[in-house]
Amino acid sequence: MEKSLHIGSLIREELRRQNHTNAWLAEKIGVTPRALQKIFNKQSIDTQQLTVISIALETDFFKFFSDALLEQ
């Protein structure tokens, strides 16, 4: 059975875990707070954008997908 990941939710959860604000991350990745909110609502995301977010939050979000594949 395929495990579905919602990358936007994972990003939002990590941002909260690190006690950063939406404005902080938006500035770090070069988007508006409104655009960041749209990212949070996405189930999937462009790999370049995910790379930029991973660097900003110092979190390997690609690992979530790798781990999900290994669990199958």
Image: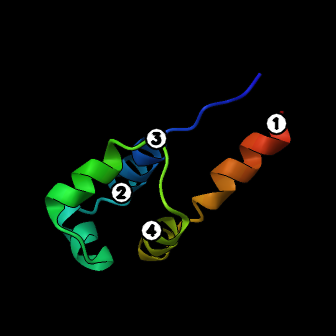
Task: Please name the residue that numbered disc 3 is placed on.
Answer: 43
* Residue ID at (15%, 56%): 34
Secondary element under disc 4, as helix, strand or loop, is helix
Task: Please name the residue that numbered disc 2 is placed on.
Answer: 15
Farthest residue to the top: give it: 1
Task: Please name the residue that numbered disc 4 is placed on.
Answer: 49
Q: Nearer the viewer, mark 4 or mark 2?
A: 4
Q: x and y percent of residue 31 in the render?
A: 23, 71
Secondary element under disc 1, as helix, strand or loop, is helix
Rounded to the nearest whole Å, what is the CA distance between mark 3 and mark 2? 16 Å
* Residue ID at (50%, 69%): 54
Task: Please name the residue that numbered disc 1 is placed on.
Answer: 71
Secondary element under disc 2, as helix, strand or loop, is helix
Q: x and y percent of residue 30 in the render?
A: 26, 77
- Callout 1 amino acid: Glu
Cβ–Cβ below 8 Å for labels 1 and 3? Answer: no
* Residue ID at (64%, 50%): 64
- Callout 3 amino acid: Gln
Q: Earlier in the sequence, mark 3 or mark 2?
A: 2
- Callout 4 amino acid: Gln
Rounded to the nearest whole Å, what is the CA distance between mark 1 and mark 3? 19 Å
Mark 4: few/some/many CA within 10 Å (<14, 14-19, 20+) = few
Q: Earlier in the sequence, mark 4 or mark 1?
A: 4
Q: The C terminus appears in which quarter of the rendering? A: top right
Q: The N terminus appears in which quarter of the rendering? A: top right
Q: Earlier in the sequence, mark 3 or mark 4?
A: 3
Relative to residue 56, is residue 34 drawn left or right? left
Rounded to the nearest whole Å, what is the CA distance between mark 2 and mark 1? 25 Å
Mark 3: few/some/many CA within 10 Å (<14, 14-19, 20+) = few
Q: Nearer the viewer, mark 2 or mark 1?
A: 1
Cβ–Cβ below 8 Å for labels 3 and 2? Answer: no
- Callout 2 amino acid: Leu
